[in-house]
Amino acid sequence: MIYWQLFLAFFIPNIVGYGGGPAIIPLIENEVVGRYGWMSSQGFAETLALGNALPSPIATKMAGYIGYDVAGVPGSLTAIFATVAPSLLLMLAALGTLYRYRDSVKVKSMSQWVRPVVMTLMAYLTWRFLAEGLDTAGTLHTAIIAGVAGVLLLATRVHPAFVVCFGLGYGALLLG
């Protein structure tokens, strides 16, 4: 029963809440503090403060922590799944619709317009990461990481996840 309550406590705010993590925090607080009484308002505020201090989306961090606090690892997994399930369901529905109309001229032209936008956003993100790397790690370390990553991605068939792990390991060992 506790797992079902955890699921509902995080699924419902994520279904009805619009605007991402900060918009659903009051809805989650209503469920966790008001309806189920798993935490006090002070405890929820401290959890929120801790969650804001860590990287990644706030709603999943809070779901993981509160779920673990209430029902251990299975509770944490249940709460995290309930948090991402609404987005997952909407994405599957959208992909199903796009797949059904994949031969449509309108869908194909929409795809043609999306690609340059995504490419531009990725280029901007890459530029920002490069600038941040130059500022924090320095030119030499940034050049080494970029050079090795470029060679691994372009000249070999190494999976990109391993290239990311290389960059993380290099940074942890030599820049930490």
Image: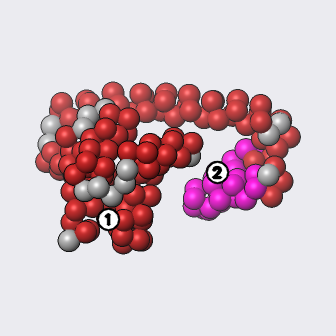
- Nearest the viewer among 100 and 165 is 165
**156 relative to 45, above or below:** below
Q: Which residue is mark 2?
A: 154
> What x and y, as percent, mark residue 165?
65, 59
Q: Is residue 112 above or below residue 155?
A: above
How many residues crowd around disc 2 within 10 Å: few (fewer than 14), some, or many (20 or more)? few
Q: Please state which of residues 56 and 89 is positioned toward the viewer in this rendering.
A: 56
- Tell me which residue sits at (86%, 40%) in the image: 140
Q: Is residue 58 above or below residue 69?
A: above
- Image: 134 above or below 165: above
- What residue lies at 25% left-to-right and 48% top-to-bottom? 34
Q: Is residue 103 visible?
A: no
Q: Earlier in the sequence, mark 1 or mark 2?
A: 1
Task: Please identify the quarter of the rendering in which residue 108 is found.
Answer: top left
The structure's colour scheme is: secondary structure
Q: Is residue 153 left or right of residue 16?
A: right
Q: Marks 1 and 2, Cα distance to the nearest angstrom?
A: 40 Å
Q: Quadrant of the N terminus?
A: bottom left
Magenta-span inclusion, residue 36: no
- Give whichever of 85, 59 is nearer the camera: 59
Give the residue at x 57% y 42%.
Answer: 53
Q: Position of residue 119 (x, y in %)?
A: 47, 32
Mark 1 vs mark 2: in front? 1
Q: Nearer the viewer, residue 153 or 84?
A: 84
| Residues rendered magenta in the picture | 146-172
Residue 164 location in percent, x, y?
63, 54
Which residue position is annotated with label 1? Answer: 78
Overall secondary structure of the magenta stretch?
Answer: helix
**Residue type marked 2:** Leu
- Residue 23 relative to residue 166: left or right: left
